[in-house]
Amino acid sequence: PHLAGLPRAFSTSPTTMSAPVLRRLKPAEIPVIRRDPVDPKARDIAAAIVDAVKARGEEAVREYAEKFGELKPGEDLILPRSKLEAAWNTLDQATQKMLVRTTHRVRRFALVQREAITEAQLDIPGGAAGHTVAAVENAGCYAPGGRYPLPSSVIMTVTTARVAGCKKVWAATPRPTPVTLGAAFIAGADAVLAVGGAHAIAALAYGCGSVGPSDCVVGPGNQYVTAAKSLIAGRVAIDMLAGPSECLVIADDSADPAVVAADLLAQAEHDPQALPSLVSLSEALIAGVEAELVRQLAVLPTADIAREACKNGYAVLVSTEEEAIEISD
């Protein structure tokens, strides 16, 4: 959507910026990065929040929600399915069709995944050995919403939990918009917890009113969400500890610079700590992408975040596909 109205042609001449959006590095200069997904400071902050929610439940969740400006006193903390449906009914037809189409695609893929996970049995002397496949009963699905709403995260987690066969599926997201609530409705959520951050993760894990406790907690989030997930792991199952977004594009001169730039910015806008990088066999392509980054950042609503993230990334010219693959690996 950020490409609307942007010129398609590109120039290989240097940009007028004092410094490139992406650093130019030689292959030998590329840093080997192994980032710890959990920031120690974030973990200390999250630990106090998780302990408070574990000890005081809904009272602590509401306290943090009001402290961080997610809720005003007296506002609903838990939105039942009836309110999700009411939000769905306020959406225009085009938005409803988009959410239905997206949910259908995610469901189809989840069904293929589910069918690929099969039970097994092997006869052995004196009996049989094997494994069975069963869904957890209660799933907690987190969707970020601090900087901008992400109904896609709601659909990708809630729909998958439903296909797996979970009996109860709860979502948590801060400041939910009608589109996010509509996504939760069409994906099949039982309720939405209208908070985010570490207190939301703790609420899904330990329970908060009619929501939780969950058997697993999944979904992306910021450093405090990741830290909180590291703290509840073992008490409940989690999907993974995801660090900042990373995007590496490998492209030759057949690639469209506008599309490559858009792919890089789509990840860069997530987080100032994101890492967007380009490996190319074409000097002209690198110059074209640089020009497109300048153009697209000029109109991108999240440009401040994306520009900071681009400082973490780089562009590198290679001579062969094998060299590009080696850098990627």
Image: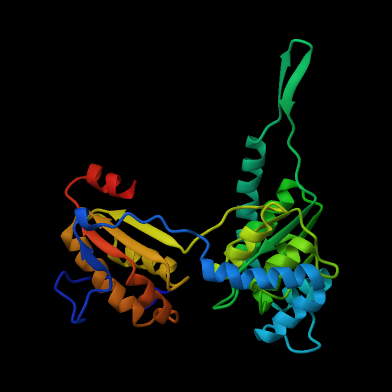
- Which percent across, then down, holds residue 10? 22, 71
Relative to 137, is 122 above or below? above
Relative to 51, is 299 above or below? below
- Which percent across, then down, holds residue 312? 34, 68
Q: Quadrant of residue 316?
A: bottom left
Taking depth in this image into account, of 216 and 277 the one nearest to the observer is 216
Residue furthest to the right in view is 210
- Which percent across, then down, holds residue 260? 33, 62
Q: Residue at x 34, y 76 (%)?
A: 296
The quadrant of the picture occupied by the N terminus is bottom left
Residue furthest to the left in view is 13
For residue 267, say whether it is visible. Answer: yes
Q: Quadrant of residue 220?
A: bottom right
Q: Quadrant of residue 180?
A: bottom right
Taking depth in this image into account, of 93 and 51 the one nearest to the observer is 51
- Which percent across, then down, holds residue 135? 75, 44
- 78 displayed left or right of 5: right
Residue furthest to the bottom in view is 73
Q: How many marks?
A: 0
Taking depth in this image into account, of 224 and 269 the one nearest to the observer is 224
